[in-house]
C-alpha cells in the first residue's frame, strides 16, 4: 500500500489533485518560477523533482513516463532539451521554495517555487583539503647530486662534459707514456755460456 501524503488533499479528489499538480509542474517548467500557496509548493516539489530525474535519464521510456503526467509535448521537450542538461551535474535539490508572505484576500501563506539552474560548484572534501594544506606547508625536498670531494663540481652541463673529456685525454696521455717507456727500455745482454762441446773443439 502506498504511503499517504501528509496534510489535507488538494482539490476535490485524488484525480483532481493529480491534474492540479501536473498543471503546476507544467507551469513551473515553462516559466522556471511560479508563485502559489505554500502548501501547493511543498506538494509540487517532489512531483517536479521526480519528473526532472526522468528527464536526466533522457531515454524513450523516461520521456513516455513524463508524458503520462504532463500531456503538453512542448513542455516535455523543453524539460528534456533545456532544463535537464543544466541540472546534469546536480544530485537532487532541483527546486527552491521561498516564502513571500500572506495573500491579501484570504491571508493564505504564499511562496515562490523556482528551478535551481545555477552551475554546481563542488567543494573539495575535508581529506583532500587537509592533504593539500600539509603538502603546501612542507617544502619540496630537492635531490642534490653527489659530488666527489677531490674534484670540483662543474657549473653546468657543458663544463661537466668538458671536464669528463679532459679526464679522458689525461688518461690517454698516461697510457701512451707508459707504453713508450716500455718500448724504450734497453735490452740487457746475456753472457754467452760455453758448452763442453765447444771446449773440446778448441
Image (cartoon, helix red, strand yellow):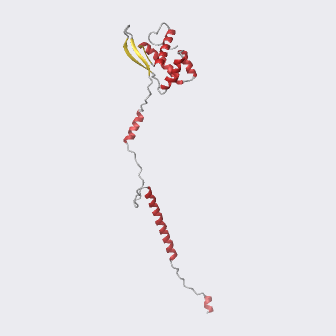
Position of residue 17 relative to residue 181, above or below, is above
Q: Residue at x 49, y 69 (%)?
A: 175
Q: Position of residue 129 (x, y in %)?
A: 40, 35
Q: Is residue 198 visible?
A: yes
Q: Residue at x 51, y 77 (%)?
A: 184
Residue 179 percent coordinates (x, y) = 51, 72
Depth check: 82 or 156 in front? 82
Left or right, residue 36 beside residue 63: left
Judged left or right of residue 139, residue 179 is right
Count of all numbered marks drawn on residues in the image:
0
Relative image position of residue 28 (x, y in whole percent): 46, 17
Pick whichever, 77 or 7, lies toward us.
77
Q: Is there any visible trace of residue 3 in the rendered image?
A: no
Outermost residue to the bottom: 202
Residue at 50% from the left image edge and 21% from the top image edge: 52
Give residue 100's position: percent from left, percent from top: 37, 15
Residue 111 position by quadrant: top left
In the image, 150 versus 199, the foreground residue is 150
Q: Identify the image quadrant of the C terminus.
A: bottom right
Using the image, determine if residue 198 lies above or below residue 45. below
Amino acid at each position: 500500500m502506498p504511503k499517504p501524503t501528509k496534510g489535507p488533499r488538494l482539490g476535490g479528489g485524488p484525480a483532481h489533485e493529480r491534474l492540479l499538480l501536473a498543471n503546476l509542474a507544467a507551469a513551473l517548467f515553462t516559466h522556471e518560477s511560479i508563485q502559489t500557496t505554500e502548501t501547493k509548493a511543498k506538494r509540487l516539489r517532489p512531483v517536479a523533482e521526480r519528473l526532472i530525474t526522468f528527464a536526466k535519464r533522457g531515454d524513450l521510456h523516461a520521456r513516455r513516463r513524463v508524458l503520462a503526467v504532463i500531456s503538453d509535448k512542448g513542455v516535455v521537450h523543453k524539460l528534456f532539451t533545456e532544463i535537464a542538461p543544466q541540472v546534469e551535474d546536480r544530485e537532487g535539490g532541483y527546486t527552491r521554495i521561498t516564502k513571500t508572505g500572506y495573500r491579501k484576500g484570504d491571508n493564505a501563506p504564499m511562496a515562490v517555487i523556482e528551478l535551481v539552474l545555477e552551475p554546481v560548484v563542488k567543494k573539495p572534501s575535508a581529506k583532500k583539503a587537509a592533504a593539500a594544506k600539509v603538502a603546501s606547508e612542507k617544502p619540496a625536498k630537492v635531490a642534490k647530486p653527489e659530488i666527489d670531494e677531490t674534484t670540483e663540481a662543474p657549473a653546468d652541463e657543458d663544463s661537466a662534459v668538458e671536464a669528463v673529456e679532459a679526464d679522458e685525454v689525461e688518461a690517454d696521455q698516461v697510457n701512451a707514456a707508459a707504453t713508450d717507456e716500455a718500448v724504450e727500455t734497453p735490452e740487457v745482454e746475456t753472457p754467452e755460456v760455453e758448452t763442453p762441446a765447444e771446449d773440446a773443439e778448441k
